[in-house]
Amino acid sequence: MRSDRSNRSPLALKIAAAAGLAFLHLPILLIFVYAFTTEDKSYQWPPPGFTIKWLGVTWNRPDVWEALWLSVRVAGIATLIAIVLGTLCAAAVSRWKFFGHETISLLVILPIALPGIITGIALRSAFNLADMPFSFWTIVLGHATFCIVVVYNNAVARFRRTSGSLIEASMDLGADGFQTFRYVILPNIGTALLAGGMLAFALSFDEVIVTTFTAGQQATLPIWMLEELVRPRQRPVTNVVAMVVVLVTFLPILAAYYLTRDGDHVAGHGK
Amino acid sequence: MSVPQTAILPGRGGAAGTAADLFWRNPKVLLALLLIPPLLWLGIIYLGSLFALLAQSFFSIDEFSGLVKYELTLKTYRELLNPANLDIIARTVLMAAAVTIAAAIVAFPVAYYAARYARGRWKALFYLGIMLPLWSSYLVKVYAWKLILAKEGILNWVFEKLHLTWLLEAYLSAPVIGGNSLSVSYTGTFLVFLYVWLPFMILPVQAALERVPGNLVEASADLGATPAQTFRNVLLPLAMPGVVAGSIFTFSLTLGDYIIPQIIGSSRLFIGQAVYAHQGTAGNIPLAAAFTVVPVVIMGFYLWGAKRLGAFNAL
């Protein structure tokens, strides 16, 4: 057997891989078709006709805007908290070996390793025990908790690639800790933090399971969609919202990919 | 005469300077300052909530008043083990196992191709092709399947165009896996679970396969193994840690999900739905808490087994 054979893939493998990728993408593409259908009572396929009327109808819906605005605010604040806490944790774990080193990694990963329903119900019963009314901040509290890991993963990977001698050189040349952070560490980990932040934003923007437990009367966009899924009332509006959500989440993911593609491909490991 | 320069500089002065000097002389202070905020957050908010929940499972609910009695008891756990609840647990675990096995089978060729044959531009395309579905909205993905599986939807249309509607009907009339239509059958639930968690299987399998040196495969072929033998005796054992790592995600996520079976599936409950129902309308927090212990215990055993198979190195 010649080794150059191994550069060609068997046809069956090609077909199976292509089928697997098609299985992953076709359902999402379908959403784009349904957003423009003229049918508004059922999920009829093929669509009887195409129209852009529903884009305008959705645009004029105050409840959709309210939900979208709430989601953006929650995701923004949760992301900021996650960036600060995740970076601190990553800096400590990657620079020093100390007692409980492994435990901290486990603790950070736990909120997404355990099923969301457990995180959700645990937080809900804790809020009840503490007599905390459900509000904007209870949603943020839950979201920030499971967003930390995304920032942490990205930051740890970047810290590992950043050579410690850079920091030592900066110190040797007379910079103090803060200057070293500002001029050496931050430029090195900046893109990783940005990427982690974008993924955290996407994760929070999309989260529904924990949110159902920590939100009171407010509806984030996913909660709004969930209500429509359980009791469909305005199918065309839901179709358009679904399409917009796909587009909105694709952008930060693509950006995160381009920010971290040189070397560490950790961006999405373990959502 | 100039003042002799000493190697030891004076302190920097100022609050920031003093702090910087302190961190330099005593890195443990810095380490503590770095660790305290995240540990406080995760320790108090997250672990605190988890333990509070666990504690509540040892309380019970008073049948007459419907209020929680704050006395330690195992009564709630006895209630958890009644046949109806055991049924829910068995159903969920079987579904999780089926989804995991199917995900491994579908994921393997994609991961294998991406790891061994895709190069340059194709490699990036494969990576994004797995990443985008992984990160795109969970609800939108479920919604897409609602569109696909609907009676007037695309899947029934395809079967009709292929003149295979009889095949679909024969399948739906089968016990257990069938139902009135795909969107209210276990098959529908299974398909959506498989779809939503598949990327979580592909990534670790791909990572494991990328670590298999190409010359091992060539050596196996040189020694006279057929491709099938190479696959079974060389590739599969080496890829197994990746498969196990992926199965942690697919298994755990299926165990805890309550939205997919609620939207697409028969009306029979899964663990997540039972938890949701008990904490919500029934107000039986102790039983809901006891129910959440089930996936935690199952995943505990699962992780312990996975660790012994070396799955964590493939994460």
Image (tube, rainbow, N blue to C red):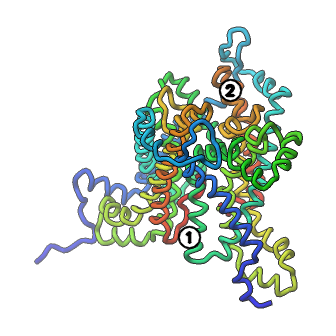
Q: Earlier in the sequence, mark 1 or mark 2?
A: 1
Callout 1 secondary element: helix
Residue at far top of view? B64
- Chain letter of the residue carrying label 2: B
Chain ID, mark 1: B
User: Where residue A241 sits in the image (x, y, percent)?
Assistant: 50, 43
Q: Nearer the viewer, residue B37 or A148?
A: A148
Q: Residue furthest front?
A: A48
Q: Is residue B307 above or below residue A209?
A: below
Q: Nearer the viewer, mark 1 or mark 2?
A: 1
Q: Amino acid at mark 2?
A: Ala
Q: Residue at x 77, y 24 (%)?
A: B74
Q: Find residue A130 and report its horizontal and vertical position in percent.
A: 51, 24
Neighbour tally class for label 1: few under 14, some 14-19, many 20 plus, Cα within 10 Å: some
What secondary structure is found at the residue carrying circle 2? helix
How far is disc 1 from disc 2 in space, using C-alphas?
43 Å
Q: Which residue is mark 2?
A: B277
Q: Quadrant of the N terminus of chain A?
A: bottom right
x%, y% of residue B28?
Answer: 44, 54
* Left/right of residue B177 with respect to residue A232 in the rendered view: right
Relative height, residue A201 to residue B76 (above, below): below
Task: Tell me what residue is drawn at x 67 percent, y 66 percent.
Answer: B206
Q: Quadrant of residue B151?
A: top right
Q: Amino acid at mark 1?
A: Ala
Find out whether the residues at labels 1 and 2 contact each other: C-beta distance under 8 Å.
no
Are tags 1 and 2 found on a single chain?
yes
**Would residue A210 be visible to someone looking at this image?**
no
* Residue under numbered circle 1: B124
**Residue B70 numbered tag:** none
Q: Nearer the viewer, residue B128 or B185?
A: B185
For the image, the number of numbered tags is 2
Instruction: Check disc 2: other Cα within 10 Å, few if <14, some if 14-19, many if 20+.
Output: some
